[in-house]
Amino acid sequence: MQALFLVLGALIVAPAMAFSAAAETEPAAKTLNFTVMRNGEPIGTTTMRISRDGDETVADIVTHIQVKIAYITVYRYDQSETERWVDGKLVAMRSLTDDNGTVHKVSATRSGDVLSVDVDGKVAEVDPAIIPVSLWNASLMRTTIAINPQDGTLTPVSVVDHGEEPLVLHGRPTTGHHYSIRTSFPQDVWYDQQHQLLKVELRGSDGSRIQYQPG
C-alpha cells in the first residue's frame, strides 16, 4: 500500500495561469471542488480557488486525504498551496505538505529574471520559465519540466494529446480535451473548452483506480 500512497501524494500536487484566452473569459473568482476516489470509494477532497484581478492570478489549492483499512487510518495527506501569477509569470508560490508525517515547506519567489526556490530552508535558483505541477493550470500541457510543490524537486513532464472526447459528468454529457501526462507517474486529465480541469484518473501501483470527481 505504501507505493500507492506515494502516488496519491504526487497526484495531488498534481490540479498557474491557464492559456491567456481562457483568462479573458473566465469570472474574477472560481472555485473547483473535487472528491478524490479510490476504487469508487471517497478518500478525500481537493478544493481549487482561482482568483483573477487584471493581470494578476492567485490560485489556492487545499487537499485532505485519509485512507482507512478496517476503520483504522493507515494514511493521511494534507497540503495547502498558494500560487501568485502576474502577466502570465509565476512570481510567488508557497506550499505546506504533511505526507503521512513527512512535512515539507516549499516556496518560490521571483526577483526580476531570477526564480528562487526554498525547500525546507535550502535555496536554489531555477529557470524562471519553470511552473509548478498544478493540474488546474492547462499550461502544464505545454511544458517539459516543472516544480513539484510537495518537495520542490524539478520533475520532467511529457504529454500525449488525445484530442476531444465525450464525457458524462453528474449524469450530463459534455466534451473534454484528453491528455495523458507523465511526470513521476502516468495520469490522464480532461479539460473543457475554457481549459478548466474536468477530470483526473490514474492507476495506483496496486492496480486501484484513482479519480478526481467534480463536486
Image (tube, rainbow, N blue to C red):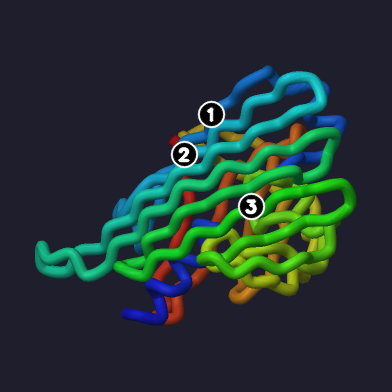
Q: Is residue 126 left or right of residue 185?
A: right
Q: Give the residue type at disc 1.
A: Thr
Q: Residue at x 57, y 49 (%)?
A: 94
Q: Is residue 14 visible?
A: no
Q: Is 180 positioned to the left or the right of 152 in the image?
A: right
Does residue 186 lie above or below 112 as drawn?
A: below
Residue 5: percent from left, percent from top: 38, 72
- The amino acid type, in three-letter code, at marker 2 is Thr
Q: Are marks 3 and 1 in contact (CB under 8 Å)?
A: no
Real-space Cα separation, disc 2 to disc 1, in angstroms? 7 Å
Query: Marks 3 and 1, Cα distance to the nearest angstrom?
Result: 15 Å
> Where is the N terminus found, in terms of image quarters?
bottom left
Q: Earlier in the sequence, mark 2 or mark 1?
A: 1
| Residue bearing mark 2 | 47
Numbered mark located on residue 92 in the image: none
Question: In the image shown, does 140 or 170 lie closer to the viewer?
Answer: 140
Q: Residue at x 56, y 54 (%)?
A: 200
